[in-house]
Amino acid sequence: MIRTHIPGFPRMGAQRELKAALESHWRGESTIDALEATGRELRRRHWALQHDSGLDFVTVGDFAFYDHMLNHIQMFGCEPARFALSATSADLTRSFALARGIQAGKHDENGCACAPAGDGQPALEMTKWFDTNYHYLVPEFGRDTTFRLHAQRLLSEVAEATALGHRAKAVLVGPLSFLWLGKSKDAGFDRLELLDTLLPLYQVLLNRLHEAGVRWVQMDEPILGLDLPDSWRKAFERAYRQFERAGASILLATYFSPLEDNLRLACGLPVAGLHIDAVRAAHEVADVLDRLPPQRTLSIGILDGRNIWRADLERALAVLRPALEQRQDLWVSTSCSLLHVPMSLSDDAALDAELASWLAGAREKLTELHVLKCALSEGDDAVRFELDEARTAQAARAVSPRVRNAAVAARIEALPADADERRSAFFHRQIRQRARLNLPAFPTTTIGSFPQTREIRAARAAFKRGELDAEAYRAQMRSEIEQVVRTQERIGLDVLVHGEAERNDMVEYFGEQLSGFAFTANGWVQSYGSRCVKPPVLFGDVSRPAPMTVDWTTYAQGLTDRPMKGMLTGPITILQWSFVRDDQPRSATALQIALAIRDEVVDLERAGIAIIQIDEPAIREGLPLRRVAWHDYLRWAARAFRISASGVRDDTQIHTHMCYSEFNDILPDIAAMDADVITIETSRSNMELLDGFGHFAYPNEIGPGVYDIHSPRVPPVDDMVRLMDKAAAVIPADRLWVNPDCGLKTRGWPETTAALENMVEAARQLRAARG
């Protein structure tokens, strides 16, 4: 029997309807009931797409108003006690308090008293979902953590799907992955100790889903693709033995990584079926077929759920046909949830016909699944047109002159061996930079962007539509830049930025000016909450035809005597946050991008810019999930950054920024990037991320973020001073900078100025306390 399904589907809607509904609600312009109605309509549409595409199941439980891990925190009743959330508040009100924090002295921004007035709490910590650009909210676990089942939302969604005539497959994050992806808040506490109290709730939930008519439950355990301690590996057997008598059949799902040493474990667990990622781990399909008991269902994730290139259907069938000969119950799927790709690309107005023919969004991948199912069950002739069309697109892309650039290849061939080295060691550079910049102790700065107001977005959109000419657009952006510069001067910041009013996205902006990139009109992908990004399509060799930021940055520098940072996005982040070509190694593409950014760095220095920031928030995100592959990735990734940064004099200060990542296990490689100053996210972790930098004796300067920009909460001065005092306990004070966690693009002006004023005052107090 051939069946098709998907592990998950995009949530935002074809026109980002969920984003609009969320932000309207957060502004107090619409009710929770209106938000819930938007959610119901989106689920109805998305299930209809899955059903109409011929899938045997629609996936239920993958929808979230903010984040699926946050859904599980609420479903299992482990909201942290520090939020003091009222049980009488709507679950979405409580959810948004966890995700966005609670401002001191207020209730919540929608008027619901989810915490006593006067209490303020930072939001839950946020970090990357494995090696994707999706951010999840991190559960907090401690010795006093208790669980209670609150499954009504999931069960209601199952009822919705059933009432619409769909066969529902529910999806849950498995108990081991849920605990592993959380964070222990008590020293010495192993969150695995909570497993035995959590398992009975999963058992009850499985039974309730079965009673609701659900025959299959997809249990996501992606941590089976990680290097696990023996205690966690052994816990899988104990956990899934408890589920043997559950009414619903369990499809254990892994993705993002090969199973490797966990393959025997995964195949031996007492579940009804196993889903594997046959894109990231194609070499393991044969082993899984051999080891998985014959009565078990095998789901092969043969289509890439992480990238947008049209599938080679003949290659996919070459994998699936031998599997079908060995397995009576074979399911065909995408490698992982389609959360990570745009809704559709087939009719995107910004793509030319040739390029569009190479691509597949979520809707197109549903069609590809249907073609594969028909070919397997009815023969190739049943879908001959579709197979021929896919073959033609593959061949056309392989020989297209748009893909290769001889000049780029020649430059890389001639690259000197020392192209990734600064002229002097950091100690000597630091002396020259301090003499040139003359900054105070605890220098203050921001990460780069300032609020993108409606007026800015409207002007940029009008310019793109041709309704605003280039001169008028330039004048409006210059006016915005001047406002940002004057505001920073008034607040008292030491190192300024121009605010990035002209930039839509930190990757898209640069990709639009580099060769080898294409852009969609509506290829949005969720990053976190209501935040969506539109990743570039990196289809060919990369070069920089002309300067990209020099005019804006030099204009801003001309408005002030204070140092103005040039703001660039680094090669690894551009690589990670794009849909990257799959016809050459990622390391080769990264090197091409690095040389393009190097050209911009050199031009900024020539224009008199003394500080240049090359952001690399995605360096940790790109790390392979298996430790055995780390060394090779970190070697070429760090080299790409150094190549981008090493064309300048010693007295030019290179900054980099990284956010929402655990760095402790790769600190030698972070140090090998040799940035003069690194700014990192630390406020949500209460500076815990900085401990590793202290133990490692990180040699260069550091700006630990003192407040969380993803929350509207304005932290008081005392909070920031306390965090910096903690930082000074592990990093010499003369090497510390004071800055927010990340860019301020998504914040409003009132909270931005209030928070920065507090930050500058905190720096003044720190200087005074240390003489």
Image (cartoon, rainbow, N blue to C red):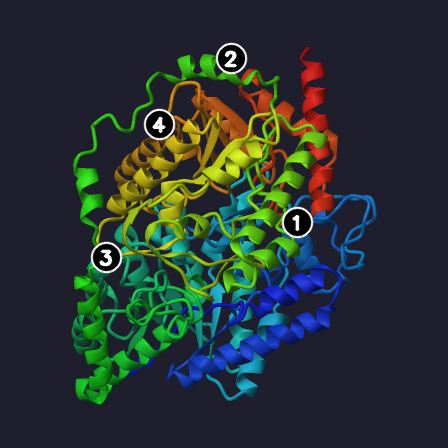
Q: Which residue is mark 4?
A: 672
Looking at the picture, does residue 638 appear above or below residue 192? above
Residue at 36% of width from left, 75% of height from top? Answer: 364
Quarter occupied by the C terminus: top right
Q: Which residue is mark 1?
A: 80
Disc number placed over residue 747 in the picture, else none:
none
Q: Which residue is mark 3?
A: 403
Q: CA distance from mark 4 to mark 3?
A: 32 Å
Residue at 43% of width from left, 84% of height from top? Answer: 51
Choose the circle earlier in sequence order: 4 or 3. Answer: 3
Q: Which residue is mark 2?
A: 435
Res 463 quadrant in image = bottom right
Residue type at mark 4 is: Ala
Q: State the residue in front, 720 or 116.
A: 720
Q: State the residue in front, 729 or 619.
A: 619
Q: Locate residue 109 relative to residue 198 in the image: left or right.
A: right
Label 2 environment density (alpha carbons within 10 Å; few <14, some 14–19, many ≥20): few
Choose the circle earlier in sequence order: 1 or 2. Answer: 1
Q: CA distance from mark 2 to mark 4?
A: 24 Å
Q: Are marks 2 and 4 in contact (CB under 8 Å)?
A: no
Residue type at mark 3 is: Val
Q: Are marks 3 and 1 in contact (CB under 8 Å)?
A: no
- Tag 3's secondary structure? loop
